[in-house]
Image: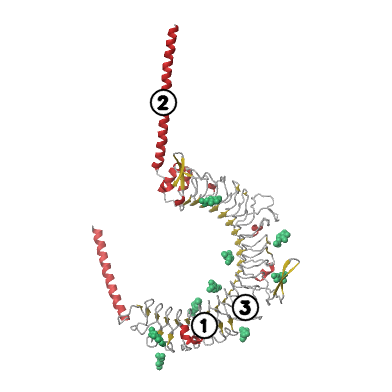
Amino acid sequence: MRPQGKVTLYKSTMGVCLWLFLAFMNEATATFRPRQLSPCQVVHMNVYCNDMNLRTVPAELPPDIHILDLSQNHLQNLTQEFLAFYTIHHLNLHSNKIQFIQPGLFRNMTNLQELDLSRNYLDIFAASKTDVGPLSTVKRLSLSGNGLYTGMTDFFLRDAPSLVNLSLDGNSITKISKDTFSGSLALRNIDLHNNVILEIEEGAFESLADLSELDLSTNSITCITDFNLSQLKLLNLSRNSLESFQTMDSDLEYELQHLDLRENKIHYFPVLPRKNKLLYLDLSRNLMRSVNTTSLMEELEYIRDGRFTTHALSCSKNAHNDLPRLLYLDMSYNQIKSISASFFRGLEALEVLNLSNNCLEAFSVDRSSPLDSLKTLDLSFNVLQNLSFEENTLRLLEELHLMGNILSFIDPTIFRRLPRIRELHLQQNFLSVCGSHHQRGHRSQAGDCIFFSSIPTLRRLYLSGNNLQSVPQGAFHGTSLWLLDLSGNPGLDIHKNAFSGLEPSLTHLSLRENDLPVLSTDLSLLSGLRDVDLSMNRLTTLPLWNKESSIEALNLQNNSLVTLEYSTVLALEKTLKTLYLGSNPLSCCGNLQFLHMVRRSSLDIPDLASVTCQYTQNSERKEMSIESVEQEHCETLDRKSLGIIIIIITALVLIAVLVLLSKICHPRRHRLRGSFKA
Ligand SMILES: *[C@@H]1O[C@H](CO)[C@@H](O)[C@H](O)[C@H]1NC(C)=O
Ligand SMILES: *[C@@H]1O[C@H](CO)[C@@H](O)[C@H](O)[C@H]1NC(C)=O
Ligand SMILES: *[C@@H]1O[C@H](CO)[C@@H](O)[C@H](O)[C@H]1NC(C)=O
Ligand SMILES: *[C@@H]1O[C@H](CO)[C@@H](O)[C@H](O)[C@H]1NC(C)=O
Ligand SMILES: *[C@@H]1O[C@H](CO)[C@@H](O)[C@H](O)[C@H]1NC(C)=O
Ligand SMILES: *[C@@H]1O[C@H](CO)[C@@H](O)[C@H](O)[C@H]1NC(C)=O
Ligand SMILES: *[C@@H]1O[C@H](CO)[C@@H](O)[C@H](O)[C@H]1NC(C)=O
Ligand SMILES: *[C@@H]1O[C@H](CO)[C@@H](O)[C@H](O)[C@H]1NC(C)=O
Ligand SMILES: *[C@@H]1O[C@H](CO)[C@@H](O)[C@H](O)[C@H]1NC(C)=O
């Protein structure tokens, strides 16, 4: 009782405190808002009236506002009468229906830094050919989504000397003329994304000495010649119709760091500034056939000797690409057929090279341009047949993607030569795996298998869909594999010591879709195993697991399992969290103990709804969901068989009695006969 009393006392003191605090807060805020306000929310000097169906600016707002948010209303006309806030810093008018602004309205807002007029009807205002007046202090202006077309921005930008960030995205501008920005020379960041720009007049951006980011993505620009915006740091030209990109020939030092040319129609590697600081270059989804640069776009294709030959009729510079700081180069989704090792000479800092989805037949790296900073190389989905890395190249490579090629006979020790390799993605090729004691271990020559053993850094290996025949003994010995994917190799023969050496490290193992009738490998030796996928095989029994199993997820879907050995299930139960079991011919009454376990434990069976089991009733084979199997169901089955047994026993007893009776009768007759004889 006493402690309870104390608690109530404490609670009531808290209540008093809270009440006093609230009362104090009321007093405090009352000084901030002398009048009763409109529905707007007021926090200090910031007023939020967004999304309130307003047609006019509420009349009762305090005069000394810093932030005024009137976005998502129905304002049409902006006039002095309603918007006389001289202290305002940030005015948000996003998503209204503004079509009229009183000229000079912003003149006396001498603190106004940010003005958001996006998503209004300012094309109507601009059509009246009136200037909005000076925006002397505005640093950030958004005019996005206003249906503005060429020339209309002039009415807003003529007198905006402090403007730093300008958003014009989502309008209908087709041309940037040379004086579009002549009234806003402080611009640093211009967003012109999603217009229909076809033409940029010479000198349009050159006068903007501080311009650092220019977004021209999603427009209709077809060609950039004599690029000379040396002050730019980021240029986004993705999603245009560019056929070429060429920098003015000069020794000027360019500041450009990010160049995005993704999704255009570029045929040749762009002509980039000779002196550059490029870090990031995206050329993916273009039409490049080679990495040659050319300064003239003429290309002749004709048939000679029945073969296609491509001629570049041009002063093909075959430029030495010096991109000494470039970290990221994406050329995926082009039509590149070959890439000479010399192309990599100027790419000393490159960390990520993506050449996936091209038409490469061979790829090699030699010592003259060793790509010694490269960490990730993606060559997936080409038609690679030949692959070679000279000794002492690719010394930092960690991830190699070779999925979807036609690799079969390559140097067996090629991957041993990559001292930092962690991930090998080799799905969908025609590779075979050598055992650790394979004969031709030390000779580097094209062999019929590849060594994966003795690569101590290797953590992930993907070999699915290689038509692998076998995984020999010790195939991965001397690696620290954490994940091994051998799925999709039907008929795979796995040696019982195939995984030796992986005991402490292997955590994820996939043997899915391998058509395995039985697993002879003792997976219980892999003490670190957490996740095993054995689905889509023909297993009839569970592989044996000892008591120390640490498996958390097990996929047994689509096998031929009838009964799950209860001892194995018990061994798994301690750690198992997720079990897939669908599409197996499970027996209902043969797995009662297991089914009990499922109900008792917190085991998750994600495909439970589709897990069925089979039983025989009236000599008919039937199926039901394992969820609906009841003990008594199997008991009734038992009772029936008991009945049959009782009938049989009764019959047998009856027969025995009859036989006995007949035997008792016969000797009597015999005796009678005997007595006759006697
Ligand atoms: C805005 O101004 C126009 C004329 O400039 C007028 O026709 C219209 O009614 C005004 N709208 C509002 C909501 O005041
Ligand atoms: C701006 O302020 C000046 C005086 O500071 C005043 O004369 C002028 O009328 C004001 N303009 C507007 C549009 O309020
Ligand atoms: C300008 O915009 C960029 C990106 O849109 C942003 O990172 C930067 O902080 C903005 N600068 C100013 C002064 O608002
Ligand atoms: C860039 O080209 C324009 C027009 O061709 C020229 O006026 C300007 O001086 C050039 N700028 C630089 C930095 O070379
Ligand atoms: C370029 O613009 C596209 C589309 O707006 C965007 O997805 C991409 O991230 C931008 N690239 C860079 C480097 O900012
Ligand atoms: C690229 O340049 C190399 C070296 O000059 C030349 O052998 C090759 O034919 C060129 N490729 C194309 C497609 O022009
Ligand atoms: C390479 O590019 C493709 C397509 O753009 C992308 O799907 C893949 O993730 C990239 N590879 C790497 C390693 O980033
Ligand atoms: C691949 O290598 C073999 C033998 O070294 C060679 O005969 C063949 O021409 C090469 N193929 C390509 C596409 O380079
Ligand atoms: C089971 O796997 C076989 C191929 O191994 C496939 O044809 C079949 O559709 C799968 N059945 C289910 C129910 O997933």
Q: Is residue 180 above or below residue 566?
A: below
Q: Determine contact: label 1, label 3, CB under 8 Å.
A: no
Question: Ligand 7, what quadrant?
Answer: bottom right
Label 3: which secondary element: strand
Q: Quadrant of residue 4?
A: bottom left
The kind of residue tagged 1 is Tyr
Say whether residue 323 is left or right of residue 607: right
Q: Which of the marked residues, 1 or 2, is nearer the chain's N terminus? A: 1
Tally of numbered discs: 3
Q: Nearer the viewer, mark 1 or mark 3?
A: 1
Say whether residue 240 is left or right of residue 649: right
Q: Quadrant of residue 282?
A: bottom right
Residue 535 visible somewhere in the drawing = no
Residue bearing the label numbered 2: 653
Residue bearing the label numbered 3: 223
Residue at 51% x, 78% y is 169
- Pinpoint residue 399: horizontal percent, then vertical percent: 59, 62
Residue at 43% x, 85% y is 100
State the CA–CA distance, disc 1 to disc 3. 21 Å
Q: Decide which of 77, 161 is in the foreground and name it.
A: 77
Q: Is residue 451 above or below residue 394?
A: above
Q: Which of the marked residues, 1 or 3, is nearer the chain's N terminus? A: 1
Label 1: which secondary element: loop
> How many residues crowd around disc 2 within 10 Å: few (fewer than 14), some, or many (20 or more)?
few
Q: Decide which of 663, 271 is in the foreground and name it.
A: 663
Residue 220 visible somewhere in the drawing = yes
Say whether residue 31 is left or right of residue 68: left
The kind of residue tagged 3 is Cys
Residue bearing the label numbered 1: 149
Q: Determine contact: label 2, label 3, CB under 8 Å.
A: no
Quarter of the image containing the N terminus?
Answer: bottom left
Q: Decide which of 231, 536 is in the foreground and name it.
A: 536
